[in-house]
Image (cartoon, rainbow, N blue to C red):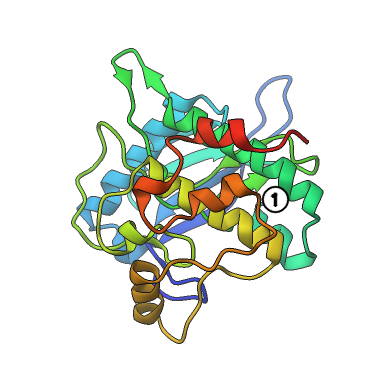
Amino acid sequence: MTRGGPLGHIKFTMRITDVILPEERGKAPSFVVEKRLAARDRAEPEAIARLHDEATLLRLLGGRVTPRFIDAGDDDHGPWLRMEKLAFPTVAQRLEHAPLERAWVDRAARAAFAALAELHQAQDDRGALALVHADLSPANLAVDDDATRAVLLDLELASWRDGAARDGAFRGTVGYCAPEVARGEMPTVASDLFALAATLMHALTGVVPRDGPSLPAVLAQAAEQPLVVTAALAPALAACLAHDAARRPASARAVLALLPLC
C-alpha cells in the first residue's frame, strides 16, 4: 500500500502509465491510460478484487462521468485496466500552476456535483448500483478548461452493491475524507459530499483542508476536529462540510439545486 505525502494518502499501490494502442484500419493510434497493481500488491486479494471492480464500474458507467472503459484483463504481471486518456487535467494539476479563479471554481462545483449525482444514481439492469466514490480529492477530480465538464477518477476504493469486501483498514486521502470515514466507518453518500466540498474549498483557497506533522496526527484531526470552513465558500458547500453527517444535505442533487447558477 502507498502511504504518506502531505495529504496523507493511503491505498493500494498502482502503476498508471500512458499506452499507445496500435492503429486500426482507417484510424490513428489511440492514447489510453493503463492501470496495474504494483509488484508488492499483486498477491493482495483485496487489491486484485478492487482493480477488477473498477473495471466493472467503468464499463457500467459508460464514460459519462468517469473515464471511458477501453479494456481489462490479466497477464503474467497480474490484472490490468485500460481507460480513456482525458484531454484536460485534474484539479490537483491545476493547483500546481496557478490559483484558481472564483468564477471557475463556482462553475466547477456545479459540474462536479452533477457528475457525483449521476454516479450515486447509477443503475444497471438489476437496479441501483448503490455506488459511493469513497476517495474524492483534487487528484481524483478532472475538470475541463471551461469548468462545464467534470470527470470522477480512480474508483478502486469505491463502495458499491457488488463490491469487494473491505478489511476495515482506513484507505483514502486524509486531507479530504469525512470524519466518520476517518473513524473507520463505511463511506456513504454523505461522506462523498464532504470530500467533494473539501476538494472544492482547496480549489478556492489554494490551501489543503487538513495537514499535520504525521499521518496519524492528520487522521486523528480528521476524525475528531470539525473542519475550519472559509467564509468565502458557497453556503451549499459549507453545509456539506458539517462534522455530523446527519447535518449534511441529503444528496449531490440537493446540493446542486442550492448552488448558484453561473
Direction from residue 232 to residue 7 in the image, left or right: left
Give the quarter of the figure containing the C terminus.
Answer: top right
Task: Tell me if I can see residue 120 in this picture.
Answer: yes
Name the residue at 45% across, 55% down. 242
Q: Looking at numbered disc 1 in the image, what kind of residue is underneath it?
A: Pro
Residue toward you, 173 or 48: 173
Residue 22 x/y as whole percent: 63, 35
Does 132 appear above or below 137? above
Q: Which residue is outermost to the top?
A: 125
Q: Quadrant of the N terminus?
A: bottom left
Q: Secondary structure at mark 1?
A: loop
Whole-percent x, y for residue 162 in the image: 25, 32
Q: Nearer the viewer, residue 179 or 213?
A: 179
Per the image, the residue denoted by label 1 is: 89
Residue 12 appearing in the image: no
Give the camera-side residue of 127 and 41.
Answer: 127
Q: Is residue 236 left or right of residue 89?
A: left
Decide: few, some or many residues near mark 1? Use Cα within 10 Å; few <14, some 14-19, many ≥20.
some
Which residue lies at the image location 57% right of the left edge and 63% below the top edge?
Answer: 229
Q: Position of residue 215 (x, y in %)?
A: 39, 78
Q: Quadrant of residue 85?
A: top right
Quadrant of the rendered structure where residue 230 is?
bottom right
Q: Nearer the viewer, residue 135 or 106?
A: 106
Q: Quadrant of residue 130?
A: top left
Depicted 3 relative to depicted 196: above or below: below
User: Where is residue 208 shown, x and y percent of the image?
Assistant: 58, 69
